[in-house]
Every structure is written in C-alpha cells, then in structure tokens.
Image: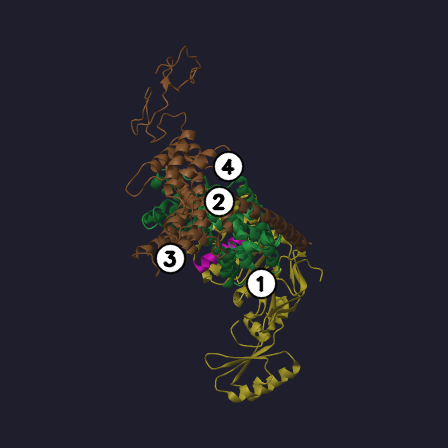
Chain colours: A yellow, B brown, C green
Amino acid sequence: MGMEAVIKTNNLSKVYKRLFKPKTHALDSLTITVPKGSVYGFLGPNGAGKTTTIKILMDLIKASSGSATVLGRPSYDVEVKGLIGFLPDSPAFSPQLTAFEFLNICAKLLKIPSDLRVNRIETVLETVKMSRHSRDKIGSFSRGMLQRIGVAQAILNEPKLLILDEPLLGLDPYGRQEFKQIILGEQAKGTSVFFSSHILSDVEEICDHIAILDKGKMLCAGRIDELLTASGTKAIIAPENDEALKELVTIAIATSRRDDGSWVLTFDNSNEIKIKLEDATKKFPQAIEISASHEKLEEFFFRIIKGDGAV
Amino acid sequence: MKNVIHIIIIIVSCLVAGILGGKLNTTQRELAPSKEAISGMPLGGFQKFISDMEWMLFVNYLGSLNTVDESNVDEVSRRLERLMSHDPNLGKIYQEGALMISIADPEKTVEILTKACNNPHLKSNSQIPFYAGFVMVQHMKPPKYKEAIPFFKMAVDRSGGGEGFNNYYASYYYRAKAKVWSDGKFDDRHALLHVLYDSWLGDTRDENYVGGGTMGGDSVDLKDRLFSAIRNVKNESEDYKPTVDGNKLADAVVQRVFSDSHICHACTAAYGPGVEYCSGCGTKLKVYGVCQFCQKAVLPGAKFCTTTGQKFPEEPKK
Amino acid sequence: MNEIIAIAGSTWKNVLRLKVVYFLVFCVWVLIASALNYDVLSLGLHKELLVDASLFLNTITGVLVIISLTFEIPKELKEGVASTMLSKPLGRTNYLIGKMIGYIVIGAIVCALVAIGSFLIFNVSFSEPIGVAMLQNHILIILSLIPMAAIAVLFSIALPEIIAPIVTVLVIWFAHSTSMLSNLPIIYGGIIPDLELFNFKSEAVYNNAVSWRYVVMVALWGICYAIFASSLASLIFSRKDIK
C-alpha cells in the first residue's frame, strides 16, 4: 500500500474458552491497517469484537493468534503506551480523587516532567471544559463529566495515536459537538484517531476511514467516501401498493419501512436490475419513485450487516 | 524472557522465605516456649484473646454455682483445661481456678497444678507449687506427703524469702518430711524435730537442705525452727505428753546445736550471765560471763574474747 | 519506581479519604477502652485484657484493610479503573506492587492510629507507661500486613471475585495455626505462609518482650514472602485478560 500505518493487525483472533461452554470467537482473523493521520471509525453491532480489538491493541487482552503493531511496535510493548491516548468504553476512575489529582497521577505514569505537569493538566481540563471542576471529587461527576475526564487523560500526553472506545457515549449533543471538535483538533495536530462508535452520523461526519465488523469478522474497510459512493439505486414505494412492492422486494438488497407506510428499497447497480426497475416504473408509475442512492453511513452499515436492528 | 525472570524471582524468594521462616520458627519457640503447649486449634492466632473471653465466662459460670461438687466438677475441669490449652501462662487459672475443684477433685487439681509447675513462664510463681503440695496433704485421702515434698520445696525455692511466704512454705515442707520419716511410728512433734535436726546436720553436706537459714534470709532460720521444735517436744499440753525418745532427741539437739547458746538444756528457757540454775526447771546451768572490754557474752573457761581477741587477765567475772 | 509510588499514592489517597475508615478506628478505640469495665468479671485482669484487646482488635483492623484489597483489585478490573491505568506506560507487575504497597501503607496508618489510641487509653487508665512488649506487638501487627497484602493480591488475581476474599480470610486465619507443618522445610514459610511468626500477643500481655533483632528478621521474612506471592500474582496477572 505504501502508506504509513499507526495500527496494523494481521489475522488477529481471540477465542474465549470457558468450562462446560462452547468456545466463543470474539475476533476472527482480523486484518486492518489504520493509516497515519486518519480518523478511523471502527463500527459494528454489539458483540462484533470492537472493544476486544481495542483491548488487544492496548495489551489489556491477549490475542489467541495473530499479531498487532501499534506505532510500529508490538502492542504488548509497555513503552509504546506513552505515545497513545486511550479512552475505555466506560471510563471509571478512583472516586475519592479530584479531577486534578487523578490527572496528576496519569501525568506521573506518562512520565510528564513535573515542571510541565500542572500546566499540561490545566490545558487539557480547559480543552474538555472541566476547569471549574478540577478540585471536585470524581465520585461526584455525572456520566458526561466522567467521559470528559476520560478524554482529558487520553490527550494529556499529546499522543501520536488516540484510541477511543465509544467516546461519544454519555455526552449530550453539545458535548458531542465539542468532542468532535477535539478529535478534529487532535487530527490537525497530526494525531491519528482510531475509535469505535454507535453514533453513525457522528462517525460519518468526522471519519475519513471506517471498518465494519460483525461477529468478529471484518465485513468491509476503506475510505468512507469510496465505500459510500459504491451504493446503488433507491426506490420509494408509496403506501398501500403491495403489488409494486411484491415485484421489487425480491431483487432489493435492503428494505426499510417508513413511518408513513411507504417502503424504501435499495438495489445494486447491475444492468439486469436497472431493466427490471424501468419495467416496474412503467407498470406502476404512481407508486414507484426511483432516485440515485446517496447512501448514508447508517444505511450502508445496515446493508453491510444485513439487518435493521439497532447498532 | 520476562516469564523466566518471573519464575527465577519466585523460586529464589520462596527459598529465602522458606529458610528464613524455618530459622525464625525455631527462634520463636525459644522466645515463646509456651506456644508449644498451646492447642493446635486454628484460632487465627487469637488464642490469648479467646482465653481471656473464656476466663470471664468461667468466672461468670463459677458465680452461678453455689459450690463446686461432684455434680459440676467435670464441667469446671473441662472449662479449666480448655482455658489452659489456649493460654497456659494465665496464672489465675491455677491460683484461683484450679483451687475451686480442689475439694471435689483433688487429683485433677494436682494434675493441673503440676502442669503449671512445669510451665517455664510461671517458674517464679511460688504459690502454684505450694497449692499443689497443699492439696496433696490436705484434700487427698490418704494425704500424699511424699509426693507433696518436691512441691513444697519448689515453693520455698521460688519464694526467695522476700515475701514472707517462705516461712509458711518451709513449715509445710518440714511437716511433710516429718510425716514421711515417721511413717506413723513417732508423734508429729518428735518427727518434726528429727527432720529439722537432720537438716541442721546436713547443712553443709546435704544439697537438698531447705530452711529459713539459707533460703529465707534473716527472717526465719533453722535454729529458730529447731528451738521451737525442741520446746514443742519438751512442753506438755492438753493433747500431748512428752515422750522419752522425744526428750532424748531434744536434749541431744540442745547439746549439739545450742551448746554455745544461753538456754537451759532441760527446758530451753533462756538465762543471763552469772545465772547458775534454770528459772524454768531448776537445772544446774553452764555459767557464762561477759568480756570486760566489749561487754559481749563469753563461754565459761574462755581465755580470749571471741569478739575483740583480748586475752583475759584473769577468770572472767561471774 | 515512580509509577509504583503513583499507583500506591492514588490507592491510599482514595481509601484514606473515606470517612468510614476513621469511624472504624473510633469504634476500635471504644472497644479497647471498654475492656476497663471488666475488672470484676476478669478478677482484676482488666489491664491484661486491655493490652490483649488492643492487639486483637488491631489485628482484626489490619486484616479488614487487607481484605478490602481483595475487593478493590477485582472492582478496579471490572469497572475499568485498571484499564485506564494500564493503558499508560505502566507494567502489570508495577500496578500490582503499587496496589499492594498502597494497601500496606493504608493498613499501617490505620493500625498505627489504633495502636496510638490504645497506648493513650492504657497510659491514662493505669498511669504507667506502655510495655516494650506491647509496642513490639503492635509493630509486628503492622509488619504482618506485608505478607498478608501479598496473599490478598495473589488470591484477588488468581481467584474469582466472590471467592477471593473468603479464601484470603481462610488462608490468613489458618496461616496462624500451621505450626504442625513446621517439619516441612522450605515449603513451610516459603510457600505456606507462617503468619504465627508475627504473633506474640500472649507474651505481650505478660510483658515479655522479644529481641528487636527478631522483629527485624521477621520483617525480612515478610518482605521475602511478599516478593514470592506478588511475583506469582504478577505471573498470573500477565496472562490475564482485563475486561
């Protein structure tokens, strides 16, 4: 490929073996490459293996097979963690410590020189809008405030790579907006960002690369603009036009019903399909509205996952 | 490689801890020998605290009893033994607890007290061996005088003489010895005088000599005890009549032990310088005088003063 | 080393700010002082009872602190606090040692508070200075926290969350009663902990002091055993998945 990678996995697998229970393949031969400087969205339904992958990258979980490198070094290298910022999926910190004390401990662990620590802590607290609460105990913080402190500790060391597990979870819309700005700001500084999220609109907004995972297997990966332009044609079938629906539903690759009773059918771009669509439009001119599919990430995601369920 | 280092550290630290632990275990047995006597029950190292609690429960239990008799002596003994197994060093178990069963079960009492006598922690406690001997001679039927002697001796040895108990313990010791010697053939007064005299004779040759003179300090000495015994042998009372053998022994003792003392050989009454006949019995006495230089008493016929060494120019003044 | 101190510091700061800790110390003081009420029931042994109660309750306090460690580590692993810490350039061994040292310091502070309180109660009640043996035993109790913390770390890593505290309590309990195993050289004291080495409570009550050399040596044993147990814990932890 020739591009510099900040994360590279090669056939990464994780199998959980439990007594008297069948083996669980949490991750199955995952191979991904996260280019330097990118904002990489890591998507998948619950149990897809996103958190497992992230934890293997952070050496919190041991891979059953395969390898992973982070910033060119093996993921189990302790020292490489000094160059990474990590936010776990549900950040929890010592409740009796104040935000400042907690960040000070993180700064010590990150080996930030003592003369720079206070300044650096104040800066990140300002960045996450938590300066007012720097002397408050973490135990008194709301979920959103905890998430902000989590982000603060992740960017404390001015990392080369940010690995974030569901960073937008628990943030209000205003907080999400701020957070996206932080991510983009970090990217502007040259930091690569790898994060998993369920909020697809936000991912679409800030990511330049995505990978979709399901049941431990990679379904697709690539630049987001490339993946989304590869979509097909969309047909909206007006309510109570069952005949038209019956004719097209068999060749659609995705279907969804709107609240008003109309149906949205998505088709691929093959010639055969195009002919069939033209025939159907002629047959039911009032019922079918054909348009080029400007597929949203959400739609793309559902199509890839092959289901309508919640992500 | 990291795992190998880990395993090496585990093995080395295990070996060092094992060797050090073994040595410390031995040291601990020397520092706290009573640990050997403590029961091996897994009490989390709280044997002492549990024994304290049990002690109070025991006291409370005793308070609920009118008396310790055959109906409850087994329960009291069981509680005592349990206390001992948790803290054999608690002196009150023996001094107060064990005596509670001394009438109902003297054998058990002695058994418990014997254990206490062998406890190095209680080696300076003189009451425990005395109680053991006391129970043997007072509560056991028939009394075990012979077995009680070592306990009384232990009590005298441990008392060191400073507490006033020595005299008391020594009295029991000699009385027990007298009982063993007489074996019912002599009356008690005669027998006591005999063993005291025997002890006096053995002062320099018998290692087992026990008496106030050497063990009790200045408060009581063997001579006082002998003097008292001679009087008891010679003096008639309501329940006692002097015997010929007794008088003979008493005279012999006076001759031997009190030859240079100013007491009547016949009735042991004291007399002063120049007195020729006993005021108690009228017996002719050895007259003694005083040194004209130091005014101390001197024996009849003495040529030199035993205090100043002065030679008397003439017969001492009568 | 700085990382270990940082983790230890966060641990003791986190725990020593809990008001319940001081409430516990206060309750222990009250219980120790209550021994004075038992002069009649103990037939005048209330002084000895006070010394013994102070040692007993201080040991219990120390064990409680150590047991809380067996709750703390699984809780941190479960809630993600450990993940956050271990995502920093901090080795897993250092994390465990930091936790262990943190709890030893917490235990030492709490036990020292209990000991100081009992010294004051003794001094005020009997108008006499405390015995060397009593002082030594309180020091031995504090020193016993070293191997006990290592045992707690080992079991909290090796065993499921619910079982770890129970097993730790049982092991600490039985480690005081294993003298019948003293015929097993190296294994006894090397693998099977001999916490009875720290126990001179009976001697302290009768004011029989032990040599200070013994105290130093037993502290050394505690450190050696802690190295053994924490290294074993670290080996297990290095292979463990952190949720």
Is residue A116 something that shows in the picture?
A: yes
Q: Which residue is mark 1?
A: A207
Q: Quadrant of the C terminus of chain B?
A: top left
Where in the figure is residue A204, as x and y percent of width and height? 56, 66
* Number of residues whose C-alpha sits closer than 10 Å to that of mark 3, classed few (under 14), some (14–19) or many (20 or more): many
Mark nearer the viewer, 3 or 4: 4
Q: Which residue is mark 2?
A: B120
Q: Which structural element holds mark 4?
A: loop
Mark nearer the viewer, 3 or 1: 3
Magenta region, residue range:
A142-153
Where in the figure is residue B272, as x and y percent of width and height? 32, 22
The amino acid at mark 2 is Pro
Find residue B207 and name its label.
4
The image quadrant of residue A84 is bottom right
The amino acid at mark 3 is Val
Mark nearer the viewer, 1 or 2: 2
Q: CA distance from mark 1 to mark 2?
A: 82 Å
The amino acid at mark 4 is Glu
* Number of residues whose C-alpha sits closer than 10 Å to that of mark 1, classed few (under 14), some (14–19) or many (20 or more): many
In this rendering, position of residue B93 left or right of residue B16: left
Where in the figure is residue C45, as x and y percent of width and height? 36, 46
The chain identifier of the residue carrying mark 1 reads A
Q: Which residue is mark 3?
A: B76
Q: CA distance from mark 1 to mark 4?
A: 104 Å
